[in-house]
Amino acid sequence: MAAPALLSAPPPLPPMDEDGGAPHAALSPGAEGDPLVPRLRRRLPAVRVTSEFNSESRLFSHRLSCRVLEGLAKIRLRVHHGAAGSPLPEFALLARNFSVAVDTASRSAVLRGVANLAGSLRLHARHNTKEQQGEVAVTANLGDSPCKIELSSLVPPDGLPRTTFIFPSGEVSIKEKYLDEGERILSVNGIVKSHVLNGVCTTLYNDNGMNIKYRYKDEELSFIPSISLPSNSLSFAFKRQFTPSDKLSYRYQFNTNHWSAVYKHKANNKHVNWKAGYESDERLGWASLWVSIHLCFNVNDRDAD
């Protein structure tokens, strides 16, 4: 829903000419001294207002966003509040290579930045003002291949940096890990994806085991069986898209016989969603409503010559 509004600003002082005096007023094509002076309109950035209500958490969320610096950056303000408690505003300034997010509830700010170094080197940095801790990562291409290598470390450092090898079908990460006894070991984590038949097979590996998941999806149906090793825990998920607005999701766990089902409906205007579901392990049925209201204000500023 758009609600344009015009705001009139007082005319600015005329600029000085090269001799130090005020320039002559620009006249309209009509007679000299005609009060109908042409006005220039300068379009100010549009302000987008979004309001949401979640009945499950009983939480209101309001967001205001506006692009500044001719679209090079965005200012975003979020406010969350429920039936009890004061509003919790969050402020963020987002740009292509830099962002800062301020959380007034925790009295902290998170700064992120990206910079291109020499050649294919790319620097990523993050810092949390409350925790006084950050992370720095450097990514580089491995020759002419599509593979990359990334070295990342906490700031201040705590052990060896983490090394990640990135390739088209996944990535493998090696980092130092502390045991309960205080001993340090090398931990390996990885993810590999490959196309099998008409679906995608994903393998996740960490120190505790492995999970293999296969996902088949078309325009109406999704079927996702998975198995975890070494526990041999088998489960499958089923999703059916009846219409662009209605979807049913079902999940079953074989080792516990627990199942859950969720039905989701999205209104045609995409501003109202509702979900209803049931969980057998908790013997609990639930429903939630999600409402979003979008308002966009285009403000024009009139400057007289």
Image (cartoon, helix red, strand yellow):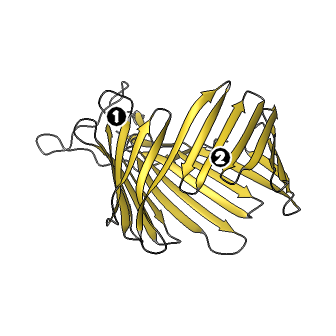
Residue 79 visible in the current orientation: yes
At a point 58% along the width and 46% down the height, the residue shown is 204
Badge 2: residue crowd in 10 Å (few <14, some 14–19, many ≥20): some
* 121, 85: nearer the viewer: 121
- In this view, 283 is above or below 107: above
Q: Nearer the viewer, mark 1 or mark 2?
A: 2
Q: Residue 294 shows which numbered tag?
A: 2
- In this view, 136 is above or below 129: above
Q: Left or right of 50: which side holds 77?
A: left
At a point 71% along the width and 31% down the height, the residue shown is 216
Whether the residues at callouts 1 and 2 have beta carbons within 8 Å, the answer is no
Measured in 3D between alpha carbons, the distance from the residue under mark 1 to the one under mark 2, in whole angstroms, is 46 Å
* 214, 26: nearer the viewer: 214
Residue 270 visible in the current orientation: no
Q: Residue 185 shows which numbered tag?
A: none
Residue 176 lies, in percent from the top left, at 40, 60
Local SS, label 1:
loop
Three-letter code, disc 1: Gly
Residue 276 lies, in percent from the top left, at 84, 52
Quadrant containing the N terminus is top right
Local SS, label 2:
strand
Q: Left or right of 143: which side holds 130?
A: right
Badge 1: residue crowd in 10 Å (few <14, some 14–19, many ≥20): few
At a point 37% along the width and 37% down the height, the residue shown is 148
Three-letter code, disc 2: His
Residue 63 lies, in percent from the top left, at 58, 54
Q: Left or right of 174: which side holds 193?
A: right
Instruction: Identify the residue at the far front of this view.
Output: 230
* 213, 153: nearer the viewer: 213
At a point 67% along the width and 49% down the height, the residue shown is 228
Residue 234 lies, in percent from the top left, at 75, 47
Q: Mark 1 = which residue?
A: 33
